[in-house]
Amino acid sequence: MDSSTDGVTLHNGFVRDLLDAIGSGPYARAARRLVEHVDLETPNQFVPIAAYNDLSAWIGREMGPATLRDAGRFVGRRAFEAMESFGSVSRSDSGVEVLRALKVAADTMIADPKGRGWTILEEGPRRAVLRRTQTFHPVLQEGLLPEVVNLSDQVTLAQVRYLTSVAEGAEYDDYEVWWR
């Protein structure tokens, strides 16, 4: 996977989501210092994806992978709400329709000269396989993907598992998301 971040930006709301997920506890001040150079006040600004990636890595390292998955769930809820407000998804959509909308939202809210983001490799009635081609933190996606799908009224108990992992030597992270 191409892990370069040169010229890649994303909507500042993603960084705000991570900070909001941390809350005001003992880690909040240190986390905010990591991204103090980023404009988080002006709505709809694009900021370097490196700030988001660095904050995600810091959460995983300092607060643990469970907290990073929780942050992913928070980001997933906010992403669903944003997609819903734009009319690109509704709670009556299927899990696959939600994941298609997530891919489009990522393509829109992440500006990458190389066009990286998500690729949907397979779709089925109760599952999909997604490939992460962008540099966002893989553990965060373990929370985000099932959460965004669980917000569909047609889905219960969405789960995710790695099919392939960059950390284990694969070229890409491929995630299988399935649900009832």
Image (cartoon, rainbow, N blue to C red):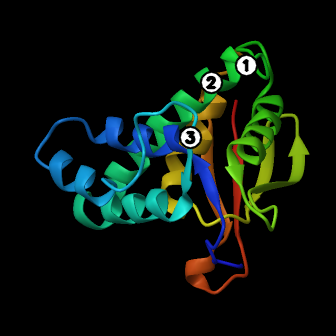
Identify the residue shown where x is 50% and y is 65%.
Answer: 50
Vertical arrangement, residue 115 with respect to residue 91, above or below? below
Name the residue tied to disc 3.
45
* Mark 1 surroundings within 10 Å by alpha-carbon count, few (fewer than 14), some (14 through 19), many (20 or more): few
Badges 1 and 2: C-beta atoms under 8 Å apart? yes
User: What's the amino acid at mark 2?
Assistant: Ala
Which circle's residue, 2 or 3, is located before the other in the chain? 3
Identify the residue shown where x is 63% and y is 73%.
Answer: 6
Name the residue tied to disc 2.
82
Identify the residue shown where x is 28% and y is 42%.
Answer: 22
* Mark 3 surroundings within 10 Å by alpha-carbon count, few (fewer than 14), some (14 through 19), many (20 or more): some
* Mark 2 surroundings within 10 Å by alpha-carbon count, few (fewer than 14), some (14 through 19), many (20 or more): some
Please tell me whether mark 2 sits on a helix, a strand or a loop. Answer: helix
Circle 3 or circle 1, nearest the eye: 3
Report the Cα–Cα distance between label 2 and label 3.
15 Å
Who is closer to the viewer here, 21 or 121? 21
Name the residue tied to disc 1.
86
Image coords of residue 69 (percent x, y): 43, 49
Who is closer to the viewer here, 71 or 179? 71
Vertical arrangement, residue 156 with respect to residue 35, above or below? above
Identify the residue shown where x is 76% and y is 12%.
Answer: 92
